[in-house]
Image (cartoon, helix red, strand yellow):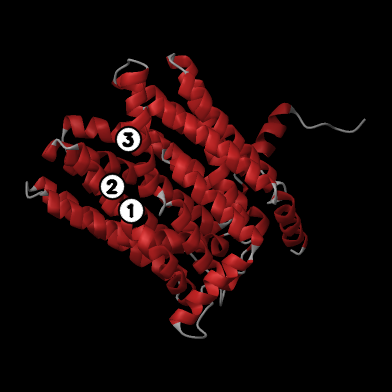
Amino acid sequence: MPDHPSSGERIRAGVAFTFRSLKYRNYRLFFLGQCVSLVGMWMQNVAMGWLVFSLTGSELLLGVVGFVENLPVLLLTPFVGVFVDRWNRHHILVVTQSLMMVQAFVLALLVLTGNTTVPLIMALAVVLGTITAVDITARQAFWIQIVDNKDDLSNAISLNSTVFNAARLVGPSLGGVIIAAIGEGLCFLLNAFSYIAVLVALLSMKFAAGVRKATARRGGYLANLKEGFSYAWGSLSIRLTLFTLACSSLVAIQYMVMLPVFAADVLNGNAMYLGYLLGSAGGGALVGAIYMARLRNALGLTGILRTGIILAGLGFIGFSFSRVLLLSILGILVLSFGIMLVISSCNVLVQTVVDDDKRGRVMGLHALCFSGMAPFGNLYMGAVAETWGAPATFLLSGVLMLVLAAVYSTRANSIEAVIAVQVKAK
């Protein structure tokens, strides 16, 4: 009789498959650096919000600081893509991560010396947003250079999402403890030091000859920019995927801004209720990221994307009607799981079909649709909630996501056919 693998062997094989991108040295280095840096980033996010509100007592200024930090991403990412295609992406990331570290050190110094003012905070937020616009575009275009097999690209992107969401669970909690015990300054300082991990990882990477060379040196800047826009618009797969991502970012992805309202006014709870909802959101996203990491390749992603949109819509609708904490937690689990499927699927779909010489420009448009829509998503959530209430906002978002699923379904088969050609061509 043939030998059958034991349950322990099957579990080990499953774990190895889920984390298979870690076999690549460069990706493993970047992954480990991110494990440290992202915790620091989430600590800084919590400390920044607490600092602004403690200085001003104004919810409006709290929103303004977030807006000015995201504004450069909205304005610059389409143009940054040309720069990313024309220059060495590895070197770009070394520079952006170094500048982010300097920004965090300056912020820490201002807070620890008692020289913090709202105008200085806003100026540093704009600086960080400008650096982020370059960093996020270069980072998305960089994955292909640190994962040798394109079939493992979806796994690498999903594992990064896993780290991001795990850090979202750890960072804010750790930041809250540090703020209560010592103050915001230490959070900024620890975040600054956390960038050392990423810089060490980047500087330790080794590449084959020619891998890091720029890809779009021919022609002028404006010609390259026009070429990128024309290419993205001319591809049904890229155009529809970016449209889906932009719509999701506008009406769904910024949902967490409303959770404090649900915790206090809808569920009649306290800060502990908010903690449960935020933990549920992080847990659902983490499970979604792990699920995506187990996919073998990009085949079937259109179906997963459609499922994610539907789950997000149903999660929104269910959560909007809930007045019980347990049911709300379950609703957020479904909602955040669905949104993670949408975010990861859109990223992998675009990364799979895009030509390498236009990857930076297209991923710049991807960053525009994802992060650049964040200010408008916050505005949409706030405006609708102010007019009709938070439950009606989530109900409307759920309905709009189901409409989006129907629109996407009309061309999903055509996109899946393109994906199948790309996968078989390897």
Q: Nearer the viewer, residue 83 or 322?
A: 322
Is 333 placed left or right of 111 in the picture?
right
Of the two numbered discs 3 and 2 on the same chain, state the one appearing first in sequence. Answer: 2
Q: Nearer the viewer, residue 270 or 411?
A: 411
Q: Are marks 1 and 2 in contact (CB under 8 Å)?
A: yes
Residue wearing tag 3: 172
Tell which tag, 3 or 2, sits nearer the viewer: 2
Which element is circle 2 on? Answer: helix
Residue at 44% over, 13% down: 324
Is 257 placed left or right of 152 in the picture?
left
Q: Quadrant of the C terminus?
A: bottom right
Residue at 55% over, 53% down: 243
Which element is circle 3 on? Answer: helix
Task: Name the mark on residue 66.
Answer: 2
Instruction: Identify the residue at the far bottom of this view.
Output: 219
Label 1 and label 2: CA atoms lie apart by 6 Å
Q: What's the residue type where badge 3 is placed? A: Pro
Q: What's the residue type where badge 1 is placed? A: Asn
Q: Quadrant of residue 234?
A: bottom right
Task: Name the mark on residue 70.
Answer: 1
